[in-house]
Amino acid sequence: MTSSVHDVGAAASFQVGKPRRVEVQGRGFVVLNVGGAHFAARDVCPHQGARLSDGRCKGHVLAAAVGAPLAYHRGRALLQCPWHGWIFDLANGSCLTDPERARIRTYPVHVRGGRVFVDLA
Amino acid sequence: MAAAVLSAPAVAEAPSEPTALGVIDCDVHPYPNTIDTLKPFLSARWVQYIEQSGFAAPPGTRYPKGFELAARRDAWPPNGLRPGADPDFARAQLLDTWNLQYAVLVPLYGHGSVHNDDFAIALATAVNEWQTHDWLDSDPRWRGSIVVTPQLPEAAAQEIRRAAKDPRYVQVMLVVRGQAPYGKRHYHPIFEAACDAGLPVGIHFGGWGTNPITATGWPSYYLEDHTGMTQAFEAQVLSLVSEGVFEKFPDLRVALIEGGFAWLPPLMWRFDKNYKGLREEVPWLRKLPSEYILEHFRMTTQPMDEPPNPQHLLHILDMIGRDDFLMFATDYPHWDFDAPDRALPSVVRGEQRDKIMSLNAAAFYDFERA
């Protein structure tokens, strides 16, 4: 029986805030290290198929009200598609602006012994 | 060429059965016959100013209309007044002929282009007072729109609070081609006052001549100006949503009047698509732009969009997605008048037809306030 858990590389090779593409059994995944917490998702935007690993890790821009000072919160695993700018929350796969209809599949990630493992089950 | 036109398939609609509910007309234009019409509603200072200066009217359109004063040729009253200046004639030609339940007056007066602030404010108030005295008092089926000075938002808010005490006023009125997009914070006192009064804001076709209808300069013809007016409506929808006006004023409702409606679905598609990538610019928004549009806006039907295949109209209504979204309007006394019994194609039937012809307006405007 083949395990669904795959070693995708040394933890040190995943820089904070830098999405990186890994390939497992011919399929591409994006792995993102946000402050030491790792996230993984299919490396394809559901909109038009761009590689999310070419995108940018984002903070979250918030406004308490119209005209209020804009805040920029870091810490969430937000990844912006490099083509049309859709932003996905890798914690749950939902698109920030259309969470019901636009989602990417995410996978559990574990770091053990300095290695990063993605569970594709 | 004329023969070719005459031999073309007839596309005119046959008269439809009158709705038992009574049609509601959301766009009728009363006009002061001359500046003298407004003098009883102006202070001595402004009457003197008018008489000394020879002021006749604010600057009008830069495009000669296809018809004098943009009016139906049969809308000139026999007593010599200009079209839209005789409430009795309008009552007979519009309200009685079509047995209208209500008709919303939308005065188009160019006080927005008057640079003297105090005079502009006085003219707006005078138009409202004249509307009350000459029109609303003349027939219980008329309902009014409060005209304001959008170039002076605080004064506009003050006028809304004053005029809204008369429950026959059912909306605040702006023209679509303003000096700047209406979502900008400068204009928010107008929306705040409208919400405080419990009134929607109507944004009507036209403007005061300071901006071309295109983003590439002044076109040559009224044909272009009239057809292209949807650009200004689109700009106002984009602005009001993007600037977060509906987050700041969640009770605000807006009627887009005389802007057509078939352009709305693709605008919503484009708006939603771009929002998904550009949300950070407008982080106060909490849902898709189309959701704000469908919740807060309504549109009047005139000038009716007329696809060659009337069935396509049903597709457009389906794309809009709400059957409470459109409200019938004639635009009387203008040349592009939509007839209550023919403008809406017969493919629109039953409850959907009743909603467009009367029920949607009855739900949107509080006609029973009065």
Image (spheres, coloured by chain):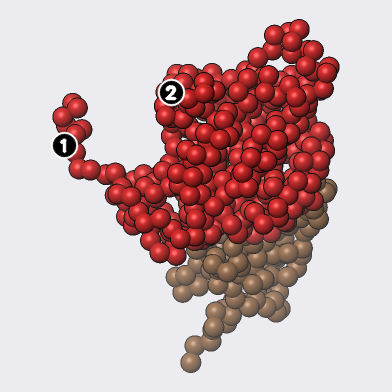
Chain colours: A brown, B red
Q: Mark 2 points at which residue?
A: B67
Q: Which amino acid does label 2 sit on?
A: Phe
The reply to whether residue B248 is visible in this rendering is yes
Q: Mark 1 points at which residue?
A: B7
Task: Where is residue A65? Give x, y as percent.
Answer: 80, 53
Asked if the residue under mark 2 is in contact with the one under mark 1, i.e. CB atoms within 8 Å, the reply is no
Is the residue marked by circle 1 packed among few (<14), some (14-19), or many (20+) residues within 10 Å? few
Where on the picture, by quarter, is residue A32?
A: bottom right
Determine the CA span between mark 1 and mark 2.
Answer: 27 Å
B295 or B80, nearer to the observer: B80
Q: Eyeballing the image, is B5 above or below B39?
A: below
Foreground disc of the pair 1, 2: 2
Where on the picture, by quarter, is residue B137?
A: top right
The reply to whether residue B267 is visible in this rendering is no
In which quadrant will I find the N terminus of chain B?
top left
Q: Eyeballing the image, is B350 above or below B251?
A: below
Q: Tag 1, which secondary structure?
A: helix
